[in-house]
Amino acid sequence: MYIKTSAVAVTLLQIAGFVQAATSTTKSTSTASSTKFVLADYWKSFNSKVDPLNITIAKIPQTTSLDGATQCKWYEPPANFDFKESEWPNLWETATSNGMNETAEFKRVYNAIDWSKAPNIKVRKIGSDGSLNMAGYDQNNDPDCWWSASTCTKPKQEGINEDIYTCPEPETWGLTYDDGPNCSHNAFYDYLEAEKIKASMFYIGSNVVNWPYGAQRGQKAGHHIADHTWSHQLMTTLTNTEVLAELYYTQKAIKMVTGVTPRHWRPAFGDVDNRVRWIATQLGLTTILWDLDTDDWAAGSTETVSTVKKTYEDYIAMGANGTFKNSGQITLTHEIDDTTMTLAMEFLPKIRKAYKNVLDVATCMNITNPYYEDNVVFAPFGAAAVSNTSSTASNTAASSTTIDITLPSASSASSAAVPVSSASSAAVSASHSATASSSVAAVAAVQNAESSAGIQLTSNSMIVAAFIVAAYLI
Ligand SMILES: [Zn+2]
């Protein structure tokens, strides 16, 4: 079941964090201002050196090569992003790590929020089997609009931004890629640029500081950049402070590296309830979910590549058979490794043939200012796709949410081709010894494989390892 997978994945990512060697304890306390702080202006205190409308990508092998291993080699961050470990949460740990909940800048944001208005919802627990504990929760009435329990997207409470989960316009494929930036994926970004395709890119904060040129490529090409949390955990299991930190430091990472501050975010595994939504709303963030899921992250590991291809084909067929005659959809796909990127490039031409519009979520919702920075403007839907269209969002319930992960037979998993980097392959290999302790083995394998990689240690491979091992444990 999906939830169990999520929870174990979280555990793995946490393990990864502990294994990692970020040890600095120096705190940044120099950003306090004497003028009264206005919460809505929090993004203005991020002193980014990057002009989002004038990004230059260095021509280093990692940003030009099409070879997977070369793209994923460590590189110095660009001169306009000065990364200091002491000023950030530890990579892949909860964003309060490294004392980041005690910094003056974070406290200023925290204290500017009127927490008395926060929905009184308990922090969720993870059960002994690694799944989200839903015992005692009224899933039928779903008072907390907990997506993991009910796929609820309408909070029904004042002061909470309602989720976006589908593109309302007919025959529209909302194109979304989660978990990047990973390495640089030049072939993929080159392809999107050449074909003038824009997607919503849900970037993980740890990955943004780890692979800054990847994020800069995303912004330079005009993709819709959004927040996917700092360490990719089940957000309903985190405290208020932790939820705020996960979102805040990812906002900061994206701003410092790309020059824009997102107005949208996506919870890892879709795990969101009204408490988490309310905190996101305090930072001006609206939740974007999905209504179709390719499971592409599992291709070649817990799913065969052909199974994932069949899912792609099915969704493509829906574009031509009238399923989306009166509405559109948002599909979940991933920016993880060569497998997910190869699948994307294989199917995008077919998707474009079957659907009238293939575009990012901001554009499909006719959102022309997806960032706080007003000078970065998106074309309205009509200009980007067809003319004379309405931007009114459909409020019908999600038609389907296909997020279950099917456990494959051992033979299909072990024989699947895994054309990815050595690090990811190591994670896959480790996960084949599917025991309760294999999570640690997988993490260790990834660590070994990437031990020479400076700060760029575990980002993309950790996600692969977490998902894969989790799927074996359910
Ligand atoms: Zn994700």
Image (cartoon, rainbow, N blue to C red):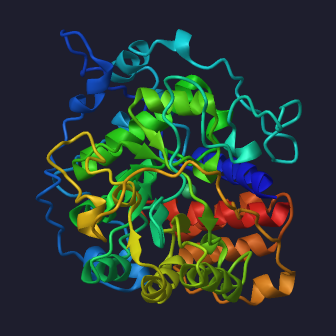
Q: Where on the picture, by quarter, is residue 411?
A: bottom right
Classify the position of ligand 1 by quadrant: top left, top right, bottom left or bottom right. Answer: bottom right
**Position in image of residue 99 (x %, y %):** 46, 26
434 lies above or below 126: below
Give the left or right position of residue 432, taking residue 198 as reference.
right
148 or 462: nearer the eye?
A: 148
108 lies above or below 338: above
Give the left or right position of residue 403, taking residue 218 as reference.
right
**Position in image of residue 239 (x %, y %):** 62, 26
Total numbered badges shown on the rendered structure: 0
**Position in image of residue 378 (x %, y %):** 23, 56
248 or 314: nearer the eye?
A: 314
Residue drawn at (65%, 82%), measured in percent from left and top? Answer: 314
Residue drawn at (76%, 34%), measured in percent from left and top? Answer: 142
Give the left or right position of residue 97, taking residue 253 as reference.
right
Quadrant occupied by the N terminus:
bottom right
Residue drawn at (43%, 16%), measured in percent from left and top? Answer: 113
Look at the image and tell me whether residue 244 can be seen.
Answer: no
Look at the image and tell me whether residue 283 can be seen.
Answer: yes
Q: Where on the picture, by quarter, is residue 235?
A: top right
**Position in image of residue 44 (x %, y %):** 21, 30
* Residue farthest toward the left in the current orientation of the protein: 54
431 lies above or below 53: below
61 lies above or below 125: below
Quadrant occupied by the C terminus:
bottom right
